[in-house]
Image: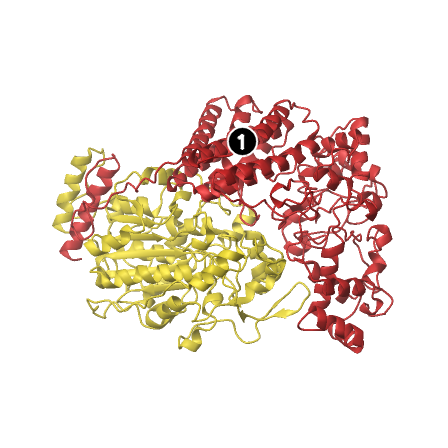
Chain colours: A red, B yellow
Amino acid sequence: MSRAAAWGVALAVVAATLGCRSSTAPAPSASGVVSSSASAARPAPPAEAQDLLARRLVSEALEATRRLAARPSEPCGYTEEDWRLRRAIAAGKALWRLSSVQGVEVLLGPARSTAEAGGMLTLYDRALEGRQCAPAREALRDISRALQLIEVELAVGVPRRETARAASLMAYELGLVLAGASAELASSELGVRADALGTLDGLEGVMTALERSGSGAAPARWRAVHAQLSQAVEAGTEAGLRGRARLVVQTGQLGVAVRAALRGAGYHVPPPYAPRVAAGSDAEREPISALTVPASKAPPTRSQVALGRRLFFEQRLSGSGQRSCASCHQPERAFTDGLAVPASLDPTTPLTRNTPTLLYALPQAVFLWDGGLATAASQALRVLHNQAEMGITAAELEERISRDPEYRRAFEEAFPEGVTTVNVGRALSAYQDAELVPANAPIDHLARGDQSALTERELAGFDVFAGAGRCARCHVPPLFGGTRPPDFSSAVFGVLGTPTRPKGKQLSPDPGRQAFTHDALDRGAFKTPNLREIARTPPYFHNGAYATLEQVVDFYDEGGGAALGLPVEHQDPDVRPLELTPEQRRELLAFLRRPLSELPASRARP
Amino acid sequence: MASVASWAALALVSLSCVACSTPEAPAPTGALPGPEEWNRKVVAPTDEVARETRAACGYRKGSLPAETQGESRPYGKEIPVDHVIVAMMENRSFDHYFQKIREAGVDADVAPEGYTNPDPNGAPIAPFPIEEHCFVDTAHSWGQIRRQVNGGAMDGFVISNEGEHEVPVNGSPEMLRGRRAMGYYTEADLPFTYFVAKNFAIGDRYFASSPTATWPNRMFMQAGTSFGEITNSFPKDVDATLLDYLTLRGVSWRVYHQNTPTFAMFIERYLELRNLENSFVPYEQFFSDLEAGLLPQMVFLDPDGTGSRQMAHTDEHPPTPSTLGQNWLAKSVAALARSSAWSRSVMFINYDEHGGLYDHVPPPKACVPDDRELTPDQEAIFGSYGVRVPFMVISPYAKKGYVSHEVYDHTSVLRFIEARFQIPALSHRDANALAPWDMFDFERPPTPEGPAIPEVPIDEDILTTCRWIWGE
């Protein structure tokens, strides 16, 4: 060791021991020269209104955790203080996400994917609800640590432009919370109320902060909509909010007003997505809410759609020449076959899963009951090549199509590569994209502002769907299935414990997603199917074991497979005894039937 | 091999304790600062005995490097470097970065001809040069990595990534196809990485420390264990990290970071240590410290992996394009090579885990890091290394164009640091780790002037495209 280096070691001891007592002594270095220029204090970015807001919300949440930690650890259960904690976190999270990654990830889980675990707030919620005091205490400790980390991470400042975008998304998120469908929702109705109030707090805070920094802001219509929504949410009780569907639609109006105010302050923020069917002629005034069906992400051309429609009914797409896509996805049965499971073409391999509807399939995040494929095009090809389903090889398929000059022309018109297997998948996907996402059910008319589209009874049914029935926690609008807006790219799976027949004593042997992921938690997990057209697509569940919607509602009301005494590992915690009243059951069924069924095409453009 | 402190060190140890008025007793005469047992007399085992004992996981937490590396290995000041720099990047596998390195004349083990993974329809997918520069992040949780490794078949990379993660704002669902995990980059995409491989040393049996996500692997780098954590969560009951031991030993250290330092996952330790003067500092200070000759003995360079814009990150974590990290690393190394610290420095560049990208080498068994009771999942995770990741050693003493085939993981780097500064093992894992000795030639006298490091400009075309796809 050189002499200089030795000095370095020695001086570093001074630094280490002095530093730990917050001394102001200059730091030494390895070369023995004492540094005076370098400083640990980072240049403090100017504290703007949104920074101050973000930090204040962290402090509020931290204060709540401190008060909660100070109370006796047993017995445990939700208190007013817990609602304050949830409310502060709901208010701050959209803002925090803009500067904090690590802290927010621990607190809430990763923003969209589920690959790296986290989500202490959810663990805390479940532990408290289950009165598991020790796990609740541990989760609370981690919430507090995560908040401390967020506090540190916020030092870099919250970017103002992205704050404006967050405000628009908060209006949309509020709709998801009110629909009982947001990803981080509390397990009880009072918790949901706290989440909704927190989201409203956060939105108000952000808008006030941004308006202060802008100039010539328009008269704040958003404040009026915000006040109406706040009043409605405040009125919520343990039994849940009433009139939720209309409130969700109103969050679309809130978004419009928020973006208008932001434009006034100089921020041009686009809506979360464009609607499949516009409500009016002014794009800036489109009320995009959690009930709005999204437009196509990449609209196909007319020739692709026409080709896809033709292929869909083409029997030459099967090895035997006797099946087309429409054999199982029959248009008159809402693109299903009415069977528990379809007949197999391969006597050695029976088919074991129910044919799902293709209506609203295209915008899904994943395809097949186990979520094993990412696109409608690859789903179509999987079925074509499967010996038990359509039973045709890629080579055979291309050869058959190429032999037909009309098809050759149609393919060449639709795709630069002409006839290829991949283009068969693309054309079928184009057809579904253009024609099988109609957005013409009563619920869609409600979403576009037709206040009378649903009856009062159906609206009450939506309240059960979003509240006491816990349905929307997995059947997420606007598709009412396992695809989360506003990105439509992350999927929801659930373990229900479905038996082999209604109230049966035998659990379905299908491993579901586990066969695909090899994860024990996924045993018996399936993608949550879309409930669009549910009245016209019996029988139900992955194995088609349930013939009527009444049976299905009973199954959930009683608490899923575990309540039937079946050996279900890791049943979804939201599948639990619901104790619905007979009236709630009737309302729920009323909502499931007409509002989610397409109207005749003549009403497509009222 | 016994440690002998210079007179200067001694004098100042006592001085420092007076200044600080801490109750700690001064170190015994003739010893380096730190607990007494750290300065115990040791008899180094033969290389043979040391190797066998390590292979049997026979060493325990607390063992000094002199007790585990073998008698021929240098120790303390015999290692002729005074500055150790670690830059841990994110989420790239060895094959994904080095598939074409043999064409550059570096003889590393990459996926052989005929290596494929089945897609969800059973069709074989071979490694291919990927043209996308900001492909959708691939899956790397414990469950997904288990599918990828598939009992050693290394054939689950495509299916485990099918449909994973979100479609970018202006992307298509096609971007979620699992085949993207079989993509590799070439010298054109990775000018800095290839430059290092040709001019310094790399390891082709360097594995992530555990087959799971970021935080546990980074904890292994900074503490030799993840304290039982197998996901990205705060560890409990953290007794010590490398930074604590360096502090105890009186070794100067500094974390230069662009955003939240990754050490923050040890939240209580971080909130305490960041109060130390000049401990966690902005990345820009790395350059001024180098110029002023103020580089501390131990340096962590933390790239930006947490800023709100992914397309500005420098940690190379997909979907962020590599060009940003390549530029960042090249800038950092160039400044080091120009500085007075160069002739007595070593910089390690490693990647926390493979991120879900393909690699053909099955991870070997590893030593369980601590004595806690383990669930079956924990046992599987802590008893095995993760998938191979790129590992580079940059130093005037690094062998040029050399490829090490020794099994290493993050704790091998840790063990090197411990050997240089005479610090005991933080866990059973680093206790049984071999430091990457074979990648150095300490006999070679260093040139005072560092080599010219090529400039690696950010590819603005890539960045523009990627920003659009991801809506930034």
Given residues B466 and B143, the one toward you in this image is: B466
Q: Name the residue located 56 percent from the left edge and 54 percent from the top edge.
A: B168
Q: Name the residue located 44 percent from the left edge and 77 percent from the top edge.
A: B103
Where residue B273 appears, as percent x and y from the top left, is: 32, 40
Residue B320 visible somewhere in the drawing: yes
Q: Secondary structure at mark 1?
A: loop
Given residues A171 and B446, the one toward you in this image is: A171
Amino acid type, residue under disc 1 in the picture: Ala
Where residue A567 appears, as percent x and y from the top left, is: 73, 42
Up/down of A558 relative to A444, above or below: above
Where residue B406 appears, as percent x and y from the top left, is: 40, 66
Q: Is residue A302 left or right of residue A15?
A: right
**Chain of the residue that carries numbered disc 1 in the rendered image:** A
Quadrant of the image containing the N terminus of chain B: bottom left
Residue B65 visible somewhere in the drawing: no
Q: Is residue A441 left or right of residue A422?
A: right
Residue highlighted by disc 1: A220
Up/down of A372 relative to B215, above or below: below
Q: Name the residue located 31 percent from the left edge and 55 percent from the top edge.
A: B417
Q: Is residue A417 left or right of residue B113?
A: right
Q: How many marks?
A: 1
Where residue B27 appears, as percent x and y from the top left, is: 20, 42
Given residues B359 and A119, the one toward you in this image is: A119
Report crowding for label 1: few under 14, some 14 to 19, many 20 or more residues within 10 A (C-alpha). some
